[in-house]
Amino acid sequence: MAKYLALTNDRVTEEHLHDLITSIGGLGGDVEVRQSGARLLLIAEALAAEGLEAALTACEHVRTVVDADLPHPLAGPVADGGRTVVRVAGVAFGAGRPVLIAGPCSAENPQVLLETAKSVRDAGAAMLRVGMFKPRTSPYSFHGLGREGIALLSGVRDEIGLPVVTEVMSVRDIDLVAGVADMVQVGARNMQNYSLLVELGRAGVPVLLKRGLAATVSEWLNAAEYLLANGASDVVLCERGIRTFDRTTRFTLDLNAVPVVKERSHLPVIVDPSHGTGVARYVGPMSAAALAAGSDGLIIEVHPDPAVALSDGDQSLDFDEFAALATRLRRICSALGTGLEPAPGLAPARP
């Protein structure tokens, strides 16, 4: 039996669906229909592979048809070899200019958040990253401001004019976080939290999906598949380091993953050199290496005084260090024949 997956657009009607199911039934096949956000995911089987594919393709409201027997069929390569461009509040991932995302590990207080947001914006970041909900190894560590910080984040977002990406850890907080953030992050510890992935897919929000700290590339792409199969259309992958036997750095930043993912998926992929190394002085070299490897962006932790940061101070850059790095990255992009993605409404900065 041949099996194909088909995603409809959001204008498909019951009549269109009935006609398609009837057509596939005539081939001796059947169709399972699942809700996928505002769209439908059709899982179709029939003996005649060519006829099944033709019947699905002929439906004007079917926008994607893929072979279900392929590994991670929705997250995998597309037939024409093209790549998806994910657009988030005017910022384009995968369009040729790397996106620089920066901000504090966590919103410790209003002053730290606002000062850092203004500094990274002025240095050339296109998006602000900040943690309101922080998954920490110890239950006694600072876990972020949580729900109390959401209103604070909304005010800072409006004041500085940068799109925001922040993490959500629980299904119950999706609506709250998505109401403020332009992009929702799934952290490494939640990469295989399938209940969370399903609900984020149904919510239809842009998602930054970090690789699990012990996940293979295949497992990472299958996590993306959960999002796509449940309605997400804007997914960006983030390599953030994996755990190996070496303890020289916090994690081992797997830059192999960048070209591998670009070969095995149509989704944009960015790199987190802050978590990937855990050491501030290594963030610059690994940022440069990530761009050379073809990364579609970087997400970097910045704090006004890393020595007193409540979380991840060892891997955070101060304002001057980040500004110097942003200048260096623009020069690297220029040498590669491109430039950094500008913040929404701003012209690209000069190298």
Image (cartoon, rainbow, N blue to C red):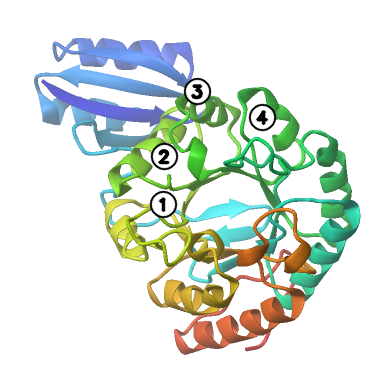
Residue 348 visible in the picture: no
Mark 4 vs 1, N-terminal side:
4
Depth check, mark 2 against mark 3: the one in front is 3
Q: Is residue 302 above or below residue 59?
A: below
Q: CA distance from mark 4 to mark 1?
A: 23 Å
Q: Name the one closer to the observer, 206 or 212.
A: 212
Q: Residues within 10 Å of mark 4 (few under 14, many from 20)?
A: some
Residue count near mark 3 (Cα–Cα under 10 Å), binned few <14, some 14–19, many ≥20: few
Q: Give the residue type at disc 2.
A: Ala
Question: Which label's residue is closer to the chain start, 1 or 3?
Answer: 3
**Few, some or many residues within 10 Å of mark 1 (<14, 14–19, 20+):** many
| Amino acid type shown at disc 4 | Ile
Task: Give 9 or 301, whichever is nearer the viewer.
Answer: 301
* Residue depicted at x 62% and y 89%: 351
Which mark is drawn over residue 195? 3
Image disc number at residue 267: 1
Helix, strand or loop status at disc 2 = helix
Q: Which residue is mark 2?
A: 224
- The mark that comes first in sequence, 1 or 2, is 2
| Residue for badge 4 | 174
Q: Is 86 located above or below residue 167 in the figure?
A: below
* Residue 79 visible in the snapshot: yes
**Total numbered circles:** 4
Give the structural element (helix, strand or loop) at label 1.
loop
Indicate which disc, 3 or 4, sits on the residue closer to the N terminus.
4
